[in-house]
Amino acid sequence: MWKQWLVGIVVVAVVVAGAGVYLGLEQVEAEQEEEAQASAVNITMPEFQQIRDQVSAVASLQAVNAVELTTEVSGRVVALNLEPGKRVEQGEVLLQLDDRQARADMAVIEAQLADARRQYDRAQSLRANNSVSQSQVDVLRTAVDVAQAQREAAKVRLENHRIEAPFAGVVGLSDISTGAYLQAGTSITTLDSSDRLELTFAIPERFVAQVQLGQSVLASSPAFPDQVFEGQLIELATRISELSRTLAVRALIDNPDGRLRPGQFMSASLTLQEREGLVLPEQAVMVRGDEKYVFVAEDGVARRVSVQVGNRMPGLVEVTRGLSTDDAVVVTGQDRLSSGNRIRVIESDLAIPDNRFEPARES
């Protein structure tokens, strides 16, 4: 009899144990199913950063001083200092024409002037004794004045045989060779000052009230994609173009190493003002019609929050209303979310891609 009771007790124990295992498995499966239904997301915290209100435009470079050098007299080239790309100082001789005839003419006029002065001085001494009339003295005085004017003209003709750099700059290309005979008006080369260049561009009319001299300008060129050139606004046009409704402006950019060249195409960005603003990655902001919104993680649940955005920067967007620095904003997987969905936050350094514009923005 006791054996039957023992068997019965064993059977009941086995049933109870099986029921416990079954219920435990069901709970685990329920938890796993609930966890599987929660969307995996990455989050980020908004933060305050320095924001620049900027206007971008297409611009071109030009030298502050730029000339095309030409000959003023005819002559044969006897000396040449026109190495393309060479930097020359103000007053440095770039080209010398044969000036032997001009020097001879100068010597003749110098002699004539000296003779005119001697005659005038003699007449003045004789006039003291009334040996000559005052009219004769006046004629000789006029002869001195004419000779002096002729000497100045001869001096200019002599100097015109020598072409000097009117300012410090870089010499351009030239096809002139020593021994060549040049006619008056022949173009010999160009000369551009390159230490500082003018950046010319136009800004839309609606920004005119915010534009001021001295504002910061950043410029970049396709020729140097990894470099940003800095400058300041120095000139504003007095009129707005009626065709384009834009205001022409000029900025001055330092170019100490001479990498930039006049006529070069540039992309300009004028900084109107700088301020502190709350920013987050632009990938976090969703757009539906006129509404812009983000999802905020709260206790494992996604909550949809409407936001107002301001300035946009490469990879970032300013949020002017709707968020604070304490809000955990969803940056991945939000396109599959609805408000109230359960979420599971995961950590990943690849959630927000590296911003390749960051060096330029910091500059």
Image (cartoon, rainbow, N blue to C red):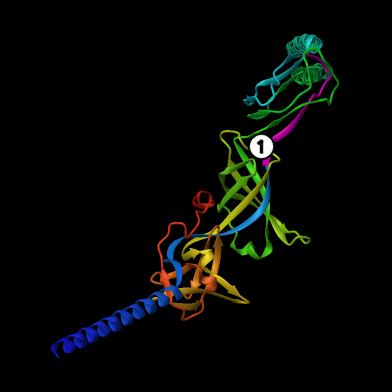
Question: Of all residues shown, which one is farthest toward the right?
Answer: 183
Find residue 169 and report its image quarter: top right
Q: Where is residue 54 in the image (x, y as percent from the top left)?
A: 58, 58
Name the residue carrying label 1.
261
Is 37 placed left or right of 207 in the picture?
left
- Closer to the camera, 110 or 343? 343
Q: Is residue 88 above or below residue 209?
A: above
**Secondary structure state at the residue bearing disc 1:** loop
- Closer to the camera, 89 or 57? 57
Question: Of all residues shown, which one is farthest toward the bottom?
Answer: 1
Residue pictured at 77% horizontal, 21% vertical: 160
Write the start and end of the magenta stretch as one range.
62-77
Is 166 placed left or right of 225 in the picture?
right
- State yes or no: residue 228 in magenta: no
In this view of the protein, can residue 327 be seen by the observer? Answer: yes
- Closer to the camera, 79 or 2? 2
Question: Of all residues shown, which one is farthest toward the left?
Answer: 2
